[in-house]
Image (cartoon, rainbow, N blue to C red):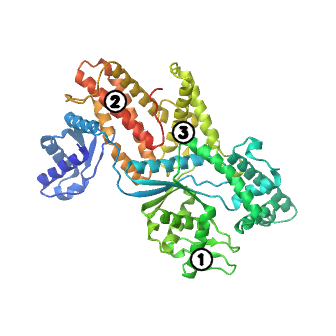
Amino acid sequence: MNLDLTLRSEIQKTVAVLFHQSVEQLQLQPTNVEFEGTHTLVCFPLTKISKKKPEETAQAVGEYLQAHSGLVSKFNVVKGFLNLSIKDEVWVKVFEGIYADKSFGIIQPLGKEIMVEYSSPNTNKPLHLGHLRNNFLGYSVAEIYKALGYTVHKVQIINDRGIHICKSMAAWKLYGHGETPESSGLKGDKLVGKYYVEFDKKFKAQCKELEEKGATKEEAEKQAPIMKLAVQMLQQWEQKDPETWKLWSTMNGWVYTGFDATYKRMGVDFEKLYYESTTYLLGKEEVLRGVEQGVFFKKEDGSVWVDLTADGLDQKVLLRSDGTSVYMTQDIGTAILRFRDFPKIEGQVYTVGNEQEYHFKVLFLILGKLGYAWAKKCYHLSYGMVDLPTGKMKSREGTVVDADDLMEEMVEEAAKQTRELGKIDEMTEQEVNDLAEMIGLGALKFFLLKVDPKKRMMFDPTESIQLQGHTGPFIQYTHARIKSILRKAESLNISPAVQDVVSLEPAEREVIFKINQYTTKLQEAGREFSPAIVANYAYELAKEYNQFYQAIPIFNESDPAKLRFRIAFSQITANTIEKAMAVLGIRVPDKM
């Protein structure tokens, strides 16, 4: 039974009977927590046909539904809002339908495809806290669309060329003395990141020295020997100088090995990798084609620009005067290549921080001007920065919170708490370690995902790993508690069943209402590209079940039908929690 559709139909019939006019669109929404009921009808739009005040309209509709629909047990009116309470027998039917549906919460393949890009790091430094939010967001959006029946292509563009990469290369060439991941004992991405920081230190020192000799700040930044070397290496790279390419390939190889280890622990994956070092060439071809067609223009110094002033933006450089490309150039090439590789995709989602909002406005406009109609199918999943109690992170100064270190700290804290709780006597050491990994990473992912992506957020490691409160471990603990109940029921030979129950406790109604919302919340999360909707849904479901658990001692129930129903009810709650957490990339334990 689809309660929402059935209720909408009954309301439409009621309106037709009472006001002698049909209505297609209804504003039906969940009831505010401070009022009794589960569904609220907004009656203000109905006053046009009822010719009554909003309160009178709501009262008339409520009375008719209560008397004739077979769905509504009672109602209350707050101004023009009609809050409806659904009969227990209806909720039981709803739950019977969910329990009988073995594919509940799983939408059959739609034959539609979508692409989601995330991570997309530079190969001059290791992944940090900001990359964690990026990866968890992108991966979760991809999993949400998979659950909604889409074929999803998970991709990333690896920014493996450009001046930033050459900065690390220049510093290693000058100060590395042949150091490798093997000789240093460092992960490859951390070793390369070390030289990115070293570049910044030397660059600042050289600039200071030049300024003391009378150079302006701008002159010093251009003339600093280490910067001149980095610029020279970039030009040599684009000219395919063998020595430069060999160093570039070697150092990038170190980084890729390091990234792979980090991604594995994060629990994220990719179907296809794109590399800026190849896509920028297609981008340059497209830019030059755009010049020929009059879409772009050349300045006297030979640089290529696009004029977007008519679109409310400004002019944007696409090729520098020396012929080298910019980020926009490679993004043009990457977008075109992806639609060639996957021509059936309904759209392309870019998971990139909100500091790049202008960049993507420009990119999508340029693609449209080049004649690509699919440019309208591109979407920038913009997200806010992650702040820390200690302040902002800066990669070049080495003040970032390293992703590997943070994950390790979270797992260590989870292991410490698990041992302190003393509930691991029957577990092997490996099981304890696996549980700590599950809890630590679950806490981290949930905390980063529960906030609307568009919002800037403060990450608090201590708060994130608490067993109580709006946290991942609280939801994981609820799942483990339910699994314990199900094991006890099995040991007592109590089988789950949903027959012969006609009345419900208030706490049971609330949990069934929440379970019934799962698919709707999944669809809403897909529309909004917001895993936060699923994360907060999972928390609300776990919270409602805990309130039920505290109010009703399950195994003290003397009525066998109610006891079997509560076991079935607990089983479906656990399954729904597991599904919701899975699309967030979070595993839930059976014991905790």
Pointer 3 residue: 444
Q: Residues within 10 Å of mark 3 (few under 14, many from 20)?
A: many
Residue 501: numbered disc: none
Instruction: Check disc 2 and give the amino acid type.
Output: Ser
Determine crowd level at label 2: few under 14, some 14-19, many 20+ residues with C-alpha closer than 10 A.
many
The structure residue drawn at horizontal position 40% and vertical position 27%, both measured from the top left corner, is: 483
Tell which of 260 and 484 is nearer to you. Answer: 260
Q: Residue at x 44, y 44 (%)?
A: 583
**Residue 34 showing in the rendered view:** no
Tell whether label 3 touches label 1 (CB within 8 Å): no
Q: Residues under labels 1 and 2: Cα distance?
A: 63 Å
Q: Amino acid at mark 1?
A: Leu
Which quadrant would the N terminus be assigned to in this image? top left
- Point out which mark residue 570 bears: 2
Check disc 1 and report the residue beneath it: 288
Between residues 190 and 501, which one lies in front from this camera angle? 190
For marks 2 and 3, give the CA distance.
26 Å
